[in-house]
Image (spheres, grey):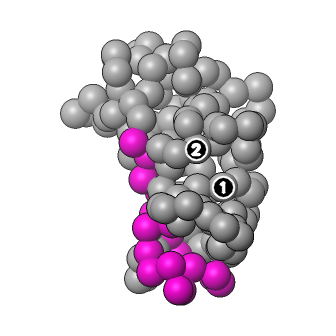
Amino acid sequence: MLVRVEKLPQSPRPLKVRVHTPVGTAVASWRGDPEKADGCHHIEWSVDENLLWGHNTQLAARAEPGLWQEHDQLVLRGRLALTEDGMAILEMGDAQILFDFSAPPPECSHGTWVEIRIEADNVALWPCQI
């Protein structure tokens, strides 16, 4: 996903940045070179939290991708795809974010629009070359 990143002033380690995506804006940890954080980057999302249906994952009221911040949480909205090996991929705009489950999701959740609420400290951005 191509995004614009801006370093936040007086950010503790790991470096926190504001990420501006085509589907919304939020704050996450930057895992690239801190000196090169500001600017436009292709990034991959890394989430260190499992999905648990009905707890941090629920059906979305709107069928469109989105990203926003609510206090100390990020909300990721997208279409959920279940894999044969028990994982999930959230399609959020042109990004695909890989997740594990804490417990099996409902079988009917494949292809549905969901909102996932994740602690912001558990979300990281990794710059990548395309």
For the residue carrying disc 1, how many other residues have a C-alpha within 10 Å: few (<14), some (14-19), or many (20+)?
Answer: many
Q: Residue at x 56, y 61 (%)?
A: 12
- Image coords of residue 120 (percent x, y): 58, 44
Q: Which residue is mark 2?
A: 120
Task: Find residue 84 and report its image quarter.
Answer: top left
* Residue 34 is a magenta residue: yes
In the rendered structure, which disc, 2 or 1, sits on the residue that comes first in sequence?
1
* Residue 16 is a magenta residue: no
Task: Find residue 87 and report its image quarter.
Answer: top left
What amino acid does circle 1 point to?
Val
Cα–Cα gap, marks 2 and 1: 7 Å
Q: Residue at x 34, y 33 (%)?
A: 100
Q: Which residue is mark 1?
A: 27
What secondary structure is found at the residue carrying circle 1? strand
Whether residue 86 sits left or right of residue 46 in the image: it is: left
- Image coords of residue 50 (percent x, y): 39, 30
Q: Nearer the viewer, residue 32 or 40?
A: 32
- Image coords of residue 44 (percent x, y): 45, 63
For the residue carrying disc 2, how many other residues have a C-alpha within 10 Å: few (<14), some (14-19), or many (20+)?
Answer: many
Q: Which residues are magenta?
A: 30-48
What amino acid does circle 2 point to?
Ala
Q: Is residue 94 visible?
A: no
Q: Nearer the viewer, residue 8 or 78?
A: 8
Q: Residue at x 43, y 67 (%)?
A: 31
Is there a contact, CB below 8 Å, between mark 2 and mark 1?
yes
- Asked if 20 appears above or below 66 in the picture, the reply is below
- Image coords of residue 83 (percent x, y): 31, 36
- Asked if 16 appears above or below 112 in the picture, the reply is below
